[in-house]
Image (cartoon, helix red, strand yellow):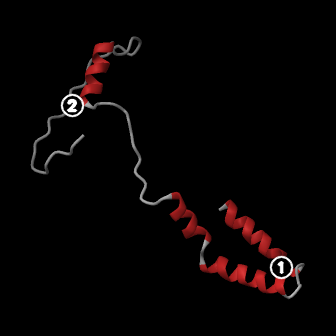
Amino acid sequence: MDAAPPDAVVPAPVRAEVDPDVGLVAADVAERVADGRTNAFAADTSRSVANIIRANVFTLFNGIIFACFFVLFVLGRWQDALFGLAAFANSIIG
């Protein structure tokens, strides 16, 4: 549905008298669908899932933690490096 120009006068929608126990008849539904008066909603996202994951996983804090994990692991101090697994799990969980 196109937006009206800023200076256009848009009439207020007319509310139909509908019995809540019965609802709309098929003709009223077809008319509303043709006019674009439905409850359809398309949520536009500003970022992709990959972009969100990249922004939340590749942070300075995670970089420092993983660098320390790597150095300790290379030095053979794998018991001291176990914190890196917790940091990795935290990054995955979010």
**Residue type, mark 1 in image:** Ala
Mark nearer the N terminus (1 vs 2): 2
Identity of the residue drawn at 41% across and 12% down? 21
Classify mark 2: helix, strand or loop.
loop
Using the image, tell me which numbered label, if any, was put on residue 81.
1
In this picture, residue 6 sits left or right of residue 84: left
> CB atoms at circles 1 and 2 under 8 Å apart?
no
**Residue type, mark 2 in image:** Pro
Classify mark 1: helix, strand or loop.
helix
Identity of the residue drawn at 25% across and 25% down? 15
Identity of the residue drawn at 37% across and 33% down? 39
Residue where numbered disc 2 is placed: 13
Using the image, tell me which numbered label, if any, was put on residue 68.
none
Mark 2 residue crowding within 10 angstroms, few (<14) / some (14–19) / many (20+)? few
Q: Nearer the viewer, residue 83 or 22?
A: 83
Identity of the residue drawn at 69% across and 60% down? 93
